[in-house]
Amino acid sequence: MIRLERLNKFYQQGDEKIHVLKDVSLQIQQGEFVAIMGPSGSGKSTLINIIGFLDHQFMGQYRFKGESMIDQSLSDYARLRNQNVGFVFQNFKLISNLSVAENVGLPLLYAGHRRKNIADQVNDVLSSVNLQGVGAKLPMQLSGGQQQRVAIARALITRPSFLLADEPTGALDSHTSQEILKLFIDLNHKSRSTIIMVTHDFQVARLSQRIIRILDGRIESDRSVDQ
């Protein structure tokens, strides 16, 4: 589904040109659960920004479902992002004055769906993350783990091609982190959801199927996880 070939990324910092990604090549198949690891400054955030259609300025080749991303317009990137990527962030990024159901349904409203047609889809996706009956509550009435489940439901509502989870357990305690990781595993196994997860924690990464390690802008290793 995702194929990167000799990807390079540069940033201009004053008079200096910083080489952030260096000849990165990798493939991610439909239905994989992949963890990307690396220290701060390794280039992992830049890499996921490119994979998630947030950054279109790079050298090399990016093919998504066989289609080259080279020379795509900004509007093409917005369309690809909205139709194919579900984002899950460390700090949830829920809108505090909207109900859980309104937060989850927001991507469908942005996509032009009618409000009256959204309710059933919201209820279904909340059930899929074990949050039945909380749709009328505000985010702050929920625990951190429940708020992250709401964020995952919001990411799933458009039925994206893949989930891009950036440190999804970083703001959670260890017990709640395990619950969220179990949810990811269940989504991957039962729904064949493709999940790309960025983490600095090996104990989190080892629950994926494959760990890609990045160091100094290069892929240091790419190995299957022995479960």
Image: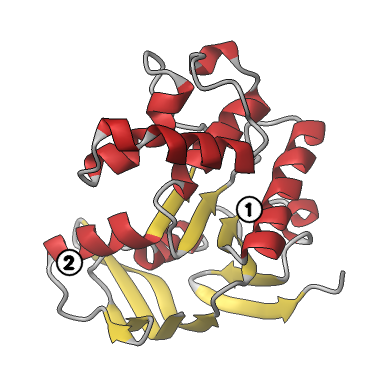
Q: Which mark is residue 76?
A: 2
- Identified at 24% across, 67% down, the residue is 56
Q: Secondary structure at mark 1?
A: loop
User: Residue flagged by tag 1: what amino acid is it?
Assistant: Thr
Query: Quick one: label 2 or label 1, which is nearer the N terminus?
Result: 2
Q: Which residue is mark 1?
A: 199
Q: Which mark is residue 134?
A: none
- Identified at 57% across, 61% down, the residue is 195
Left or right: residue 11 versus residue 149 is left
Above or below residue 61? Residue 138 is above
Please provide percent x and percent y for residue 178: 79, 42
User: Residue flagged by tag 2: what amino acid is it?
Assistant: Asp
Given this view, does label 2 or label 1 mark the residue nearer the observer? Answer: 2
Please provide percent x and percent y for residue 118: 36, 36
Identify which residue, 120 or 219, lies in the foreground: 120
Left or right: residue 202 versus residue 161 is right
Please provide percent x and percent y for residue 180: 70, 42
Above or below residue 165? Residue 131 is above
Above or below residue 25? Residue 95 is above
Label 1 neighbourhood size at 10 Å, few (<14), some (14-19), many (20+)? many
Above or below residue 126? Residue 155 is below
Examine the image and state in which quarter residue 142 appears: top right
Please provide percent x and percent y for residue 190: 69, 61
Work out how far the residue at label 2 is from the one at label 1, CA to CA, in angstroms: 29 Å
- Identified at 44% across, 65% down, the residue is 161
- Identified at 24% across, 47% down, the residue is 111
Q: Secondary structure at mark 2?
A: helix
Q: Is any part of residue 90 visible from this angle? A: no
Quadrant of the snapshot with the C terminus: bottom right
